[in-house]
Amino acid sequence: MAGDTEIARMLVKDLEVNAKYLLEKLEMIAEEDNELLLGGSNRCIFEREYNRIGKYLRMVPRSMRGSVIEVLKEIVKKVIGGVRPKKKKRAERWLKIIARYGGFGDKELAEIVKKIRVRKKEEKRKVRFSDRPRAKPVFLGKYKGMEELKEELPVVYEALKSVEEVFSGRFITNNWVENEWSHFVRINVVGMALVRKYGSFVNVMNAVVDKIVEVIFKEEGE
């Protein structure tokens, strides 16, 4: 939208009304947004209203934004001053939406917005290999141990035994071993085809183990 057109003037007038409403109802909206968060709702009234103003204001030429910008300055000042939800999570959502739009080309509003401090997401702690917990024993459901499983389900026992021999004391991490595993066998998608090809579930597992062992020795050789 370019120039001083009738549509632009109508849009500015509408944005003025919306911005003044937001300013007047800011305390009430803060309480409502706080209650929505406590009730488990993801809705945010302030975000919806400010977002609407922001999207349409950017469509208006900068020379025509002045009246709306003045109201936004008052809104941002009040929010920075503490007129926002008591719950920190919802309060930060208010600050993020303001920071996202910045000053709309207005230097004074931009300076006010700069005062906003939004908490950045904490980076995930990089876990050293030595810090990783040891692998837990294989979950056997109602069976107390491998021997009991061997007596009732010998086929499953043989398969788990083969896997245990390969992975005992090791970790499945995001590396070439996991890559080979995920590419060689995707049980959920081609499980039945693999059983048909190899003849039984045990043979499938043995083939997986053979492939992984092959990759391990290949990697170590390199």
Image (cartoon, rainbow, N blue to C red):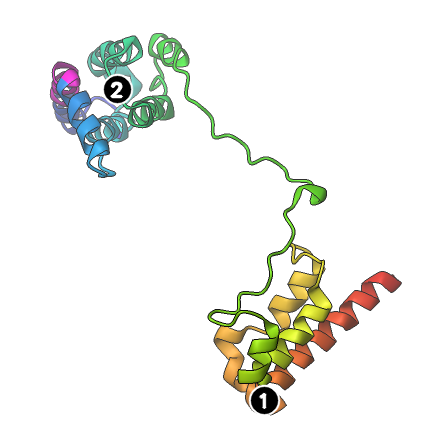
Q: Is residue 131 magenta?
A: no
Q: How many marks?
A: 2
Q: Indicate left or right for 193 with 79 as reference.
A: right
Which label belongs to residue 200? 1
Q: Indicate left or right for 64 with 191 as reference.
A: left
Q: Nearer the viewer, residue 213 or 30?
A: 213
Kind of residue indicated by mark 1: Ser
Secondary structure state at the residue bearing disc 1: loop
Q: Position of residue 7 (x, y in %)?
A: 15, 29
Above or below, comparing residue 43 to residue 85 in the picture: below
Residue stretch rendered in magenta on the structure: 17-27
In the rendered image, which quarter contains the C terminus? bottom right
Q: Which quadrant of the figure has residue 88?
A: top left
Kind of residue indicated by mark 2: Lys
Q: Which quadrant of the figure has residue 149?
A: bottom right
Above or below, comparing residue 81 to residue 27 in the picture: above
Find the distance from the CA under tag 2 to the CA under tag 1. Answer: 61 Å
Above or below, comparing residue 181 to residue 6 in the picture: below
Q: Position of residue 127 (x, y in %)?
A: 64, 40
Residue carrying label 2: 86
Q: Which quadrant of the figure has residue 115?
A: top left
- Tell me the residue at 33%/21% (across/down): 95
* Local crowd size for mark 1, using a 10 Å CA cut-off: few (<14), some (14–19), many (≥20): some
